[in-house]
Image (spheres, helix red, strand yellow):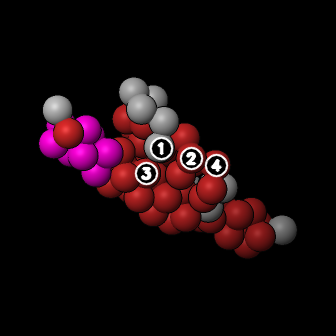
């Protein structure tokens, strides 16, 4: 049982790290999405949500070029 808990904890941490990386790459709040990525049974939803969110950094750059 302890081994299962450790494996689940490691999986949650890996998903939280991926949420952090995706949020920082796309320009979203890193702390917010990392904390949401640590919530069990909700973390996969947050991770998939981040995968489909648009990139804010590129849209900001495009907006500054149009002005």
SS class, disc 1 = helix
View extreme (top): residue = 41
Circle on res. 32: 4
- Whole-angstrom CA distance, mark 4 to mark 2, is 5 Å
Q: Nearer the viewer, residue 54 or 67?
A: 54
Instruction: Tell me the residue at 68%/69% (across/down).
Output: 61
Residue 44 placement (x, y as % from top left): 37, 35
Prevailing SS of the magenta stretch: helix
Residue indicated by mark 1: 37
Q: Magenta span covers which residues?
A: 3-10
How many residues crowd mark 1 within 10 Å: few (<14), some (14–19), many (20+)? Answer: many
Closer to the chain start, of discs 3 and 1, is 3
Residue 47 placement (x, y as % from top left): 42, 42
- Whole-angstrom CA distance, mark 3 to mark 2, is 7 Å
Asked if residue 28 lies left or right of residue 9, the reply is: right
Closer to the chain start, of discs 1 and 4, is 4
Circle on res. 35: 2
- Whole-angstrom CA distance, mark 3 to mark 1, is 4 Å
How many residues crowd mark 3 within 10 Å: few (<14), some (14–19), many (20+)? Answer: many
Q: Is residue 59 magenta?
A: no
- Whole-angstrom CA distance, mark 3 to mark 4, is 11 Å
Instruction: Tell me the residue at 53%/51% (across/down).
Output: 34
Residue indicated by mark 3: 16
Q: Nearer the viewer, residue 47 or 62?
A: 47
Give the quarter of the figure containing the C terminus: bottom right
Closer to the chain start, of discs 3 and 2, is 3
View extreme (front): residue = 2
């Amino acid at each position: 049982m302890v081994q299962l808990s450790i494996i689940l904890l490691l999986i949650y941490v890996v998903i939280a790290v991926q949420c952090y990386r995706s949020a920082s790459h796309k320009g979203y709040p890193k702390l917010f999405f990392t904390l949401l990525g640590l919530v069990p049974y909700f973390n996969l939803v947050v991770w998939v949500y981040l995968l489909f969110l648009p990139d804010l950094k590129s849209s900001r750059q495009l907006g500054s070029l149009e002005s």
